[in-house]
Amino acid sequence: EVQLVESGGGSVQPGGSLRLSCATSGFAFSDAHMAWFRQAPGKRVEWVSNINPDGGTTNYAASVKGRFTISRDNAKNTVYLQLNSLKVEDTGVYYCQKLGLATRGQGTQVTVSS
C-alpha cells in the first residue's frame, strides 16, 4: 500500500522559513519522480515543484522559484521542501505525491500571516 505522510507545516510570519518532509512507503522510492503540490483555501490544487529519482533535476513553479528548494533522501524514502522567504500567498495545505499516482497524503498546513 502506497503511503505518504507529510509533516513540518506550521504558522510563520512573512519572511519566515519552514522545512516540509514527506515520508513514503509502499513503492520503489528511489525510482520515483516526486512532486509537491499545494492548495490554498478556495483555490485549485497548484503544482509547486518536482524532483527526478536521483535528485539531479528539479523544477519549480514561477511563484516559488528562488525561495523554495526540493530535495530527497533515497536512503530514508523521504522528500523535502525547504520554504524560505515565505509570503502570505504561500498559505495552504501542502501535499507530496509520486508522479503518475493519484495517491497523496493528508497534507501539512502552512500558514503565513503577520
Image (cartoon, helix red, strand yellow):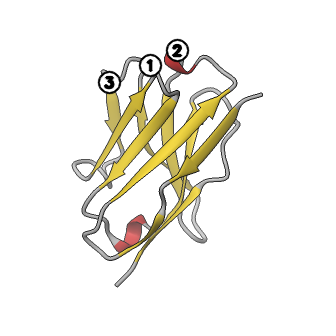
Q: Which-is-in-front pick, marks 1 and 3?
A: 1
Against 28, residue 103 (above or below) is below
* Distance from Cα at disc 2 to Cα at disc 3: 13 Å
User: Does dot 1 land on a helix, a strand or a loop?
Assistant: loop
Against 98, residue 4 (above or below) is below
Percent position of residue 64, x then y: 31, 53
Q: Earlier in the sequence, mark 2 or mark 3?
A: 2
Q: Please give the residue where the numbered disc 2 appears in the rendered image.
A: 31
* Distance from Cα at disc 1 to Cα at disc 3: 8 Å
Look at label 1 and name its amino acid. Answer: Pro
Tell me which residue sits at (24%, 63%) in the image: 85
User: The N terminus lies in which quarter of the figure?
Assistant: top right
Mark 3 surroundings within 10 Å by alpha-carbon count, few (fewer than 14), some (14 through 19), many (20 or more): few
Tell me which residue sits at (40%, 64%) in the image: 90
Q: Please give the residue where the numbered disc 3 appears in the rendered image.
A: 57
Percent position of residue 21, x then y: 48, 45
Left or right placement of residue 97 versus residue 21 in this view: right
Q: Are marks 2 and 1 in contact (CB under 8 Å)?
A: yes
